[in-house]
Structure formats: structure tokens, C-alpha cells
Image: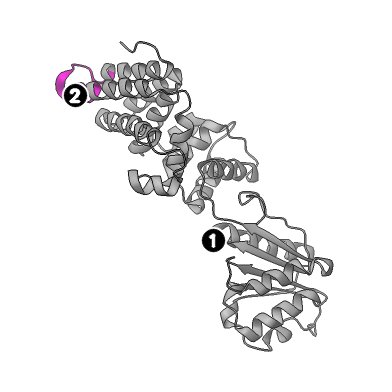
């Protein structure tokens, strides 16, 4: 498998055969669309055939790739090539070694052992103009951040790391939804897209706002945490929700920090009830924390929870004090 480059935009150079491999359905689909568009731009007027490999019968490949009476060539997209019948798979393997002129063949394949002969055939047919594009599953937090940055670049916009993190918090980990959110922000805003822009656009998502406050606090960014806290309170986010997010953020530090070093993100995610990308983020946030500091931060959150729920006259003051104590606990200072 090639390096993990699933978030990169697909190549649009027109070649006789392209095999798009991967489990990331959104990226594979978009790669096919981009490739078809590139062919249509280079040679307008050609036919486009888009079908599933399971629907392709023996001998049909030759018919679809034969020269047209009217010229102009064609594009043939065969999806889920791993599901092709034995005879059709053999025809495809032979075809990629000697592709027809004026025909662009685009294959998709889920990867894995099923239909591996076709993968091998494409790898061995580079001299005939075949290439492979790989889109492995995007599972890591850092990969999703890279994906968001790339989406903004595709839209001709600049976004900083804070915006990428805030958008991931607000929208979630689904790539199709993230891509749509990036397109929407790029179309509806001007200038640099930063965390405050994302926060304003998604101000209706109270849970995301609380988690943003928590993330900035456990990462030690006091000014950013206080800014997000005051913005959240000013826009009507419940203090109870913010306190709950702070508690969850600090508790995850403790649970992930106490886990065995070799534990996988997936296994730990199942244990603590958080998605794997969140585990990756918490592992990054743990840098700079000491177990004693986490214990102090937990105590600060517990006090804030009681105050927010009725023991204090000002919930805003209780939350701000909790944020300051969490940041101080990370730095090893006396939080009181």
C-alpha cells in the first residue's frame, strides 16, 4: 500500500487506464467524477458509460471499448471491480495490458484479497499507460485535519489549524459532511477562515461549542479557552453543557493516560466509549500533563459542576475559574 495520501486531491491527467483503490467511498466516488470531468474537458462529446462490474457480462467489455462509428472516443467507468465475474475479471486483466485507443477506462476496487489478480495486472501494465490511485480508510485525527485543510485549498481558501479542529468538532468525522461544510464556509465567508468563523457559523451546535472550550483548556491555551467560553455564554449555550464538556475532556485525559502504551485507538475507543479520532486527539492533548495535574483538574471540574448547578451566584464566574484551574493544573502550578 502506498503512503497514506487519501486526503490529496485526485490526479486529473488523462491516461488510458486508472484503477482507483480504497474503502473511503466518498473519496473514491469523487476521484471517479473528477477523472470523468477531466476526460470530458480534454475531449468533449465522447460517450460515458458508468456501471457496476457485477452487471458486466462476458464479452461486453469488448463491445463497450470498440471504436464508435461517430468517433470521439469514450469513458468507461467500471465500479467495484472486485465483484466482477471470473470471465469478466480475466477480460479486464487482459485489457489493461493492451488498452484500446480513444478509450479511457476507470476501475474502482475496494482493495483486499478479492479480485487481487486485477490489482496485480494494473500494477504490471504501467508501460501500457495504466496507473493506480489509492484512497485508504481515513481513521486518524491528523488525517481528518489534513482532509479539511485540503478541502479549503480545493475551494481556493485559507483556513488555519484552529478552524480545522473546530469544524471537526462541529460536524463530526464523516468525510462527505466535512467536505460539504468546507464548501459552504468557503462560499459564505470572506478572508481567512479561523476558529471564530467556524464558531459563528455553527453557533447552534451547543455541544460542539462546549467541547471547543474543553479542548482549548486541556491543551493549555488559556486566552483561547476563555474567549470561547465567553462567546458560548453570550450566545446562550447552557453553562451545564459547558461544564459537562469540561468534565468529559478531563476524564478522557485520565482514562487515556492510564491505558497501556501499546493499546490501539480502536480498542481504547471501544473501552471508553469515544470514537478513535477522539482518542488520537486526547493522546496529543496529554503531552505536558502529569497524573497529579489531571487529578487537580478533575477536582476543579467537580467544584464547578456543583457551583453551576446551584451553589454559586454566577455560573459564568464558576466556569471561568474552572478553566483557569485546568490550564494551571496542566502547567503544574497551584490551581487555587
What residue is pinned by disc 2? 306
Please say which color scheme the image uses.
one colour
Is 310 within the magenta?
A: yes
What residue is pinned by disc 1? 25
User: What range is drawn magenta here?
Assistant: 304-316
Residue 280 drawn above or below residue 287: below
Q: Position of residue 92 (x, y in %)?
A: 70, 78
Left or right: residue 238 versus residue 334 is left
Residue at horizontal 55%, vertical 58%?
24
Residue 121 drawn above or below residue 156: below
Residue 155 falls in image quadrant: top right
Question: Which part of the image, by quadrant, shows the C terminus?
Answer: top left
Q: Position of residue 52 (x, y in %)?
A: 58, 76
Q: Position of residue 175 (x, y in %)?
A: 51, 51
Residue 214 falls in image quadrant: top left
**SS under mark 1:** helix
Q: Tell which of 257 and 148 is nearer to you.
A: 257
Q: Main secondary structure of the magenta part?
A: helix
Label drawn at residue 73 = none
Is 22 within the magenta?
A: no
**SS under mark 2:** helix
Q: Tell which of 242 and 200 is nearer to you.
A: 242
**Earlier sequence position, callout 2 versus callout 1:** 1
Mark 1 crowd level (few <14, some 14–19, many ≥20, 10 Å Cα)? some
Q: Tell which of 147 and 277 is nearer to you.
A: 277
Gap between marks 2 and 1 measured at Cα = 46 Å
Residue at horizontal 41%, vertical 26%?
218
Q: Position of residue 266 (x, y in %)?
A: 43, 49
Amino acid at each position: 500500500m502506498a503512503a497514506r495520501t487519501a486526503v490529496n486531491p485526485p490526479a486529473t491527467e488523462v491516461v488510458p487506464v486508472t484503477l482507483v483503490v480504497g474503502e473511503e467511498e466518498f473519496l473514491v466516488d469523487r476521484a471517479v467524477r473528477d477523472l470523468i470531468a477531466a476526460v470530458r474537458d480534454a475531449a468533449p462529446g465522447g460517450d460515458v458509460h458508468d456501471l457496476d462490474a457485477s452487471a458486466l457480462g462476458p464479452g461486453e467489455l469488448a463491445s463497450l471499448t470498440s471504436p464508435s462509428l461517430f468517433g470521439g472516443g469514450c469513458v468507461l467507468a467500471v465500479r467495484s471491480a472486485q465483484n466482477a465475474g471470473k470471465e469478466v475479471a480475466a477480460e479486464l486483466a487482459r485489457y489493461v495490458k493492451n488498452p484500446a485507443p480513444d478509450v479511457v477506462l476507470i476501475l474502482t476496487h475496494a482493495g483486499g484479497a478479492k479480485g487481487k489478480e486485477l490489482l496485480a495486472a494494473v500494477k504490471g501494465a504501467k508501460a501500457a499507460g495504466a496507473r493506480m490511485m489509492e484512497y485508504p480508510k481515513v481513521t486518524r485525527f491528523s488525517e481528518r485535519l489534513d482532509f479539511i485543510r485540503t478541502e479549503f485549498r480545493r475551494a481556493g481558501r485559507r483556513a488555519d489549524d484552529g478552524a480545522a479542529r473546530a469544524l471537526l468538532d462541529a460536524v463530526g468525522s464523516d468525510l462527505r459532511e466535512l467536505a460539504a461544510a468546507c464548501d459552504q464556509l468557503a462560499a459564505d465567508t470572506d478572508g481567512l477562515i479561523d476558529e471564530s468563523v467556524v464558531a459563528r457559523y455553527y453557533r447552534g451546535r451547543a455541544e460542539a461549542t462546549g467541547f471547543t472550550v474543553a479542548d482549548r483548556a486541556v491543551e493549555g491555551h488559556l486566552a483561547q479557552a476563555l474567549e470561547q467560553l465567553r462567546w458560548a455564554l453570550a450566545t446562550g449555550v447552557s453553562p451545564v453543557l459547558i461544564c459537562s464538556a469540561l468534565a468529559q475532556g478531563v476524564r478522557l485525559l485520565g482514562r487515556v493516560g492510564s491505558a497501556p502504551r501499546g493499546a490501539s485507538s480502536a480498542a481504547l475507543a471501544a473501552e471508553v466509549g469515544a470514537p478513535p479520532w477522539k482518542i488520537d486527539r486526547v493522546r496529543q492533548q496529554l503531552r505536558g500533563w502529569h497524573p497529579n495535574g489531571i487529578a487537580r483538574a478533575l477536582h476543579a471540574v467537580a467544584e464547578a459542576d456543583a457551583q453551576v448547578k446551584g451553589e454559586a451566584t454566577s455560573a459564568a464566574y464558576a466556569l471561568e475559574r474552572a478553566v483557569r484551574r485546568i490550564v494551571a493544573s496542566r502547567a503544574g502550578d497551584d490551581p487555587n
